[in-house]
């Protein structure tokens, strides 16, 4: 959780559900390997993967 925002994964993508939203929104492109960890620091999303290190994405 990041305040009132929830993040989740479906193997190779990360999705975001905001407090007033009724649908998940994809916030990353397809990642070439399985996602294992997530961290949010302000407007930056860090995505840990199996075998490809950490990807960094700027959130809107």
Image (cartoon, helix red, strand yellow):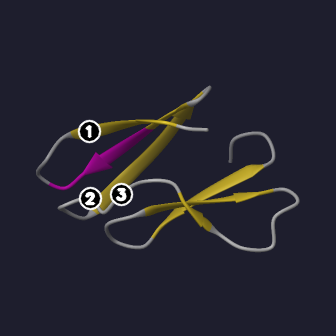
Residue at image mark 1: 54
Q: Nearer the viewer, residue 41 or 25?
A: 25
In the visual, does 25 lie left or right of 19? left
Q: Which SS type dominates the magenta stretch?
A: strand
Q: Quadrant of residue 55?
A: top left
Closer to the eye: label 2 or 3: 3
Residue found farthest to the right: 20
Q: Dot 2 surroundings within 10 Å: few (below 14), some, or many (20 or more)?
A: some
Classify 10 Å Cα crowding around label 1: few (below 14), some (14-19), many (20 and above): some
Q: Compared with residue 42, is residue 23 higher up or lower down, i.e. above or below?
A: below
Closer to the camera, 20 or 33? 20
Q: Which residue is mark 2?
A: 31
Q: CA distance from mark 2 to mark 3?
A: 6 Å
* Residue shown at the point (26%, 38%) measured from the top left: 54
| Mark 1, secondary structure of its residue | strand
Q: Residue furthest top?
A: 42
Q: Position of residue 20 (x, y in %)?
A: 88, 60
In the image, which disc is placed on residue 29?
A: 3
Residue 46 x/y as whole percent: 41, 37
Give the residue at x 81% y 47%: 4
Q: Quadrant of residue 50?
A: bottom left
> Which disc number belongs to residue 25?
none
Local crowd size for mark 3, using a 10 Å CA cut-off: few (<14), some (14–19), many (≥20): few
Q: What residue span does the magenta drawing correspond to?
A: 46-50
Of labels 2 and 1, the one closer to you: 2
Q: Position of residue 21 (x, y in %)?
A: 81, 64
């Amino acid at each position: 959780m990041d305040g009132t925002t929830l993040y989740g994964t479906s193997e190779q993508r990360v999705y975001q559900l905001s407090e007033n939203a009724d649908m998940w929104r994809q916030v990353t492109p397809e990642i070439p390997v399985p996602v294992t960890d997530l961290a949010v620091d302000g407007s930056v999303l860090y995505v840990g993967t199996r075998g490809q290190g950490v990807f960094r994405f700027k959130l809107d």
